[in-house]
Image (cartoon, helix red, strand yellow):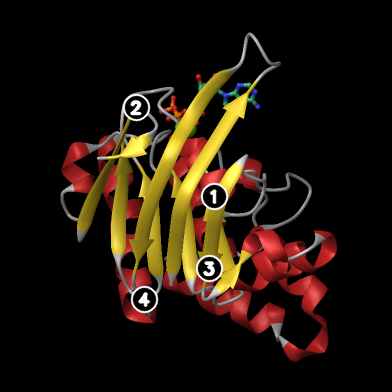
Amino acid sequence: MLKVRGLFKSFGPPGGKITVLRGVDLSLEKGDIAALMGPSGVGKSTLLHLVAGLEPPDSGEVEVGGRALGTIAGEELDSFRNRAIGIVYQHHYLLPEFTALENVMVPTLKSGPAVDGRRKAAELLEAVGLKDRLGHFPSQLSGGEQQRVSLARALVMSPRLVLADEPTGDLDETTSDMVFDLIFSLSRARGITLLMATHNVRLAEKCDRIMRLHGGRIE
Ligand SMILES: Nc1ncnc2c1ncn2[C@@H]1O[C@H](COP(=O)(O)OP(=O)(O)OP(=O)(O)O)[C@@H](O)[C@H]1O
Ligand SMILES: [Mg+2]
């Protein structure tokens, strides 16, 4: 489902530049649930951005569902990402002027009438326990509820791969466990491949695999 080969990424001008990724290789099969760990600044978010095709690597290759992201151009890459990859961030990035239901529907708007966005969005909000919050705006939701809305949004296009960047980082322990359990069980039930950056050892240990980023490579 996900193959990463020889990924290099540097930032900054030549001379002052820092090389964050130095040959990352990893591969995940369909349904694998993996935690990505490593100290702050080691490059976890950078790696997730490259895997999502949000930024190009300096060299190396990312393949999602058999397609090499480097061979997909501009708008087609956006549309591929929208269909194939769900992303959950630490800060949920919900649109404040849209309701929970509308936020979850956003990814479906580009895909035309083929996807019944409203129905799917409502079903997913029910699955994350927010059936009674469809009309709430983000400011009217608790932190854990906002993160559950963003999880529903990540799943609404039925992606094969979900990338999560410290999805429970902003939450208290109880809420964090609850949101993690939801990500975990919904991914399992749908055969989704999940790659999740986290600092939480206890939650990481529940995953099938833990990958540690160190010195720009996966140990
Ligand atoms: N756009 C950028 N321009 C310059 N440097 C960057 C950029 N993005 C990331 N970096 C640098 O790359 C390194 C890795 O950052 P990254 O955000 O991937 O770390 P991380 O492992 O996700 O850390 P954290 O656990 O704190 O989220 C950091 O030193 C950061 O300053
Ligand atoms: Mg990060």
Measured from the top left, where is residue 15 in percent x and y? 65, 9
Q: Quadrant of the C terminus?
A: top left
Provide the secondary structure element on which disc 1 rests: strand
Q: Amino acid at mark 3?
A: Val
Kindly identify which residue carries mark 4. Answer: 30
Q: Residue at x 71, y 16 (%)?
A: 13
Q: Which dot marks residue 215?
A: 2
Q: Nearer the viewer, mark 1 or mark 3?
A: 1
Q: CA distance from mark 4 to mark 3?
A: 11 Å
Q: Which dot marks residue 64?
A: 3
Q: CA distance from mark 1 to mark 2?
A: 17 Å
- Mark 4 and mark 2 residues within 8 Å of each other at the beta carbon: no
Q: Amino acid at mark 4?
A: Lys
Which numbered disc flags the more N-terminal residue, 4 or 3?
4
- Mark 1 and mark 2 residues within 8 Å of each other at the beta carbon: no
Q: Is residue 94 left or right of residue 205?
A: right
Q: Residue at x 68, y 50 (%)?
A: 137
Measured from the top left, where is residue 92 in percent x and y? 57, 44
**Residue in the foreground of this view, choosing between 90 and 198:** 198
Q: Which dot marks residue 208?
A: none
Q: CA distance from mark 4 to mark 2?
A: 27 Å
Q: With respect to residue 145, does 187 lie above or below? A: below
Q: Amino acid at mark 1?
A: Gly
Q: Is residue 170 left or right of residue 8?
A: left
Q: CA distance from mark 1 to mark 3?
A: 14 Å
Q: With respect to residue 216, does 105 lie above or below? A: below
Provide the secondary structure element on which disc 2 rests: loop
Q: Nearer the viewer, mark 4 or mark 2?
A: 2
Q: Residue at x 29, y 49 (%)?
A: 35
